[in-house]
Image (spheres, grey):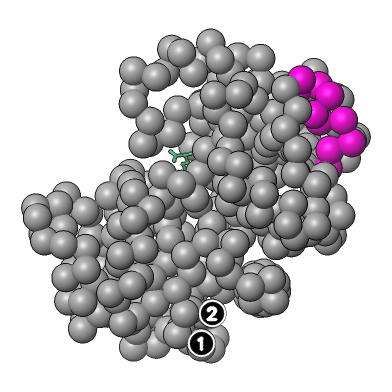
Amino acid sequence: MTSFLDIHTTSKSDLRAIIDSARAMKDARNGATKGTPDADQPLKNRMVALIFEKPSTRTRVSFDLGVRQMGGQTMVLSGKEMQLGHGETIADTARVLSRYVDLIMIRTFEEATLLEMAEHATVPVINGLTNRTHPCQIMADVMTYEEHRGPIAGRKVVWSGDGNNVCASLIQAAGQFGFDFTFTGPPPLDPEPEWIDFARAQGVKAEIERDPARAVRGADLIVTDTWVSMHDPQSARERRHNQLRGYQVNAALMAEANPDALFMHCLPAHREDEVTSEVMDGPQSVIWDEAENRLHAQKAVMRWCLGV
Ligand code: CP
Ligand code: NVA
């Protein structure tokens, strides 16, 4: 019984085992109709609480569906409707929920909320996104890259735009899965130095290159995300657009990368801001596989957490 809190705090061998298990489950489902259950029903008689303090389409649907495919049941809880939003401590909420359910997934604002939940819960807790990281997304991204191009180890991955929560998990993954990473974006939006240091300490290249065209040279994968995240003040929107305009992923930028480079975006996307429709809908984009793989990757994460 283990929590899945972040990529840098999960061992390399466990991360690899989760990706392999996701791949095997996806393969086993090939040919199945969307809603049909998995034959082995590993979550039979298990109840999973899915807590959302922020909006979600993919995380909500893929976790809910994943639990049901594996024979378990879910309750989707909105932070605002729980006592959590009205003064009950995270620790007390964790203690109570642990008496009812077998697993907790939480999408929240502060990382401290996730950590407090995990510390006081006696069931595993999964990070469904905080202001700081989004590990489930990057597990799906690694799975997607490998399904199209083989091992990600030794490849070059470039992030263009805001050095946000998704970017942080990608840098952690560079260290854990052994790929080189380059960030390109303006200095105020750099990723936290802690993540760059972590990746370097694992023996991979982790660099910052201000010139986007130079950054993507030799790239095997280009990734971006919204310029304004859910936790960012809406008042930042105009300033962000001015800061990031030059870091849009468009056909000209893709042309500077390796010819077989892939494009990914965790979604939701803002077409013609951080990425053009030409790239999103173009032949190098694997965004729909990436979204589908949230389902398979998270099923593997849940099995790992519960040891089933
Ligand atoms: N990528 C992702 O986490 O999407 P949602 O916000 O829709 O869950
Ligand atoms: N960086 C985005 C990711 C959404 C899935 C956000 O936090 O809003």
**Vertical relation: 188 (above or below) 291:** above
**Vertical relation: 199 (above or below) 189:** below
Q: Image point 60% across, 42% down: which residue?
A: 193
Q: Are marks 2 and 1 in contact (CB under 8 Å)?
A: yes
**Vertical relation: 103 (above or below) 271:** below
Q: Is residue 307 magenta?
A: no
Q: For label 1, count other residues whose C-alpha is less than 10 Å away and answer few (under 14), some (14-19) or many (20+).
A: few
Q: Is residue 202 left or right of residue 125?
A: right
Which corner quadrant of the image does residue 142 belong to? bottom right
Query: What is the x, y in percent for residue 279?
Result: 71, 28
State the separation of the CA atoms marked 2 and 1. 5 Å
Residue tagged by mark 2? Answer: 304
Quadrant position of the N terminus in the picture: bottom left
What residue span does the magenta drawing correspond to?
211-220
Query: What is the x, y in percent for residue 304?
Result: 54, 79
Helix, strand or loop status at disc 1: loop
Residue tagged by mark 1? Answer: 307
Query: What is the x, y in percent for residue 123?
Result: 34, 80
Amino acid type of the residue that numbered disc 1 sits on in the rendered structure: Gly
